[in-house]
Image (spheres, coloured by chain):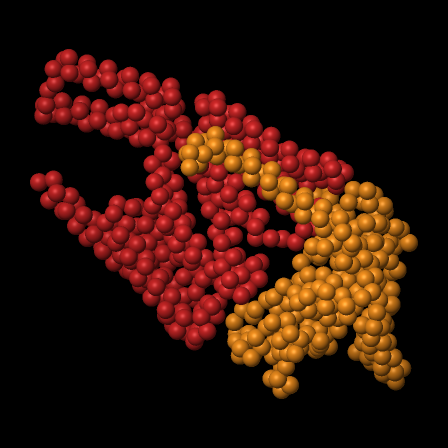
Chain colours: A orange, B red
Amino acid sequence: MKIFKSSWGLFVLAFILLFCTNAVVLIGAYTNRAMEATSQTVLTQRELQLPYKNIRENNGMSLRLVYRTLNADTRKGSYHKIPAWLNTAKLNELGFDTNRDLSTARYKKPPTKEVFIVLEYDGEAYQKSLALAKENFVEKEVLFNAKKDDNKTKREYEDARGRLNREQMSESRLFAIDAGLEYEKLRQKYSDKSTYMIVKGLVRLVYQDKIEKEQYASIQQLNIENIYLPYKFKYVLKDITTDNSLNNRLGSAPKYEVEIKYGIRYEPWISSVEII
Amino acid sequence: MEIESGITAQQRTDQIKSFQAELQILKDENIISLLQEQNKAIAKYHQELLANYSLKFDVDTSKNEKQLSLGMKIASFLAALALAFSIFLLFFQFWGDYTQNTQIAILILAPSILLGVTIYLRKQQKGDYYTKISALLAFVTFVLNISMLGQIFNIAPSPNALLVWSLFAFLLAYALNARLLLGVGIIFFSFFLSAKVGVWGGGYWINFSEHPENFFPVAAILFLLSFVNHSKLSSFDIVYRYFSMLLFFLPVLILSNNGLLSYAEMDRQFIQGFYQIVGFSVSAFAIYIGINKGLSELTNMGNVFFVIFLYTKFFNWWWDLMPKYIFFLIIGLSAVFILMILKRFKSKLLKNTHWGLS
């Protein structure tokens, strides 16, 4: 091949590579948005959060998609993302060889799979999480009223009150509730596109409950967790940027809502942003 | 003899300079004497050759020039690195203030213009250093181009981006005889291929570094590539060999210390022991082959990794058991022992050369 032997030929190939790659990326992005959206939901600041802090060298902005799970082991808290429904039966359905992995996963690097994950917005899972927080608060309140001088019960009571407050006001209401290998099957089961977002993510085996003989997995990450905020919406949020993370921790109400859509390649984009 | 590339012109120049120095010594020691016409003819021939190379390939004809060239190479490397960082930060600094169409236009135009500048400078021939700086910047902006389009359109990360970047770096490296770009291309290619091997092994591509064995195929491919004819390119074969050895020995070193990272479903100790044996034997074999075939990079990498394997083993065996002064005494004595073996190798080589000459 003569073209590979001359430097001019190689430069021509470099130009072709540059333009073809850009064309493929742009056509892919256009195709994703051209057809009917696969998911279309309006979320709030609770689910789509601003960055923890502004980076001086980067003035572009992305919103972080925050989702939670109702965990198999409640001691591990909701941020470990080890949901109760991601058990042996579900893992077998997702194509994990649990018989083999049960013996090796604990010691080796456990296997990971890309699957579709169903995210439910403000639904049953959130109500359950809210009920748990209320239940916990009532329990601690009873203990506190019985022993008002005890520092430990006082601290636990205040923690429970803070947790309930955050659960009502600022924690994300987006919960991962199911997973599968086929989008269509999941969409048939969860047909409401505004309540159920179906996105791609990674599931990884985590641990084995030897007594129950149950294998659990965690949601390692969603394929896209940071969603770019286009120029036209950036200035809508300009007054909210600085005090975001502190407000969230204190449990203040959300200040904006964002419409998010997922295209046929399951890649999201922000289609509107409004101040509440 | 027609010289076609800068590297062969530089080799020929060095050869002429060595010949001239040796000839002078032979004359001073009265070993030979040439007629005045012969002296003149040789001097004229060499002078014309050197002038021609200097004009065409910008070769270094003296020791001072060579030192200057080295300084220029270091300066151009630093310039390329600093400018690349500067472009990265410049993009990010003003990124959010542009509309989507402007962003796309900037992202596509930046590498295209820099590639055009590279071609223009290449045409000028003389500006070799500037050409390579410009090519590296074209590469950096191409990486920015694809990664930031991915960010704007929220595209899921893909290993194919690594392949495209490596191809772009390879094309520029071969067009400009640029080793730095070749190294960059090799790094991206090794990430791509090991990610693919990870997928074939049943994992997800992002987690490719969790199994060091994913790097073995790429090490083998790079080693084979080093034997493709690269005579017109400066030390490309050596760069390939260095990377192939690195991508083989590093995973072996990791696996010899942590067998859990292996694909093999066997006893951890067995896997570690296996990779320790592989590490010692292949590094020793690399030293042997390197000496026999005159491939210094094989010898060097073999030496370095043999010593690392040895000291890692010493550490595992004795660090907790021995007083530290004895541990370091053993390390010192073993280094002396290795030195003795290498010296014996060297004298054996010299002996062979002597026999060959006589």
Residue A46 seen in this snapshot: no
Residue B316 sits in quarter: bottom left
Give the residue at x 30% y 62%: B281
Outermost residue, right side: A276
In this rendering, does residue B202 appear at all? Answer: yes
Q: Position of residue B163 (x, y in %)?
A: 53, 48
- Name the residue located 26 percent from the left edge and 45 percent from the top edge: B294
User: Where residue B249 appears, x then y in whole percent?
Assistant: 39, 57
Q: Image quadrant of residue A137? A: bottom right
Quadrant location, the N terminus of chain B? top left
In the image, residue A223 above or below residue A133:
above
Number of residue marks: 0
| Residue closer to the observer: A165 or B190 | B190
Query: Left or right: A19 with respect to B39?
Result: right
Q: Viewed as shown, does residue A262 lie left or right of A2? A: right
Q: Is residue A174 above or below residue B152?
A: below
Q: Nearer the viewer, residue A134 or B238?
A: B238
Residue B96, picture quadrant: top right
The quadrant of the image that shows the C terminus of chain B is top left
Residue occupying image coordinates x 28% and y 57%: B285
Q: Is residue A152 above or below residue B13?
A: below
Q: Residue at x 40, y 56 (%)?
A: B248
Residue B92 is left or right of residue B170, and the answer is right
Q: Estimate the x, y position of residue B156 in percent, counting from the top left.
A: 66, 54
Instruction: Tell me residue B296's x, y (percent).
Output: 30, 46
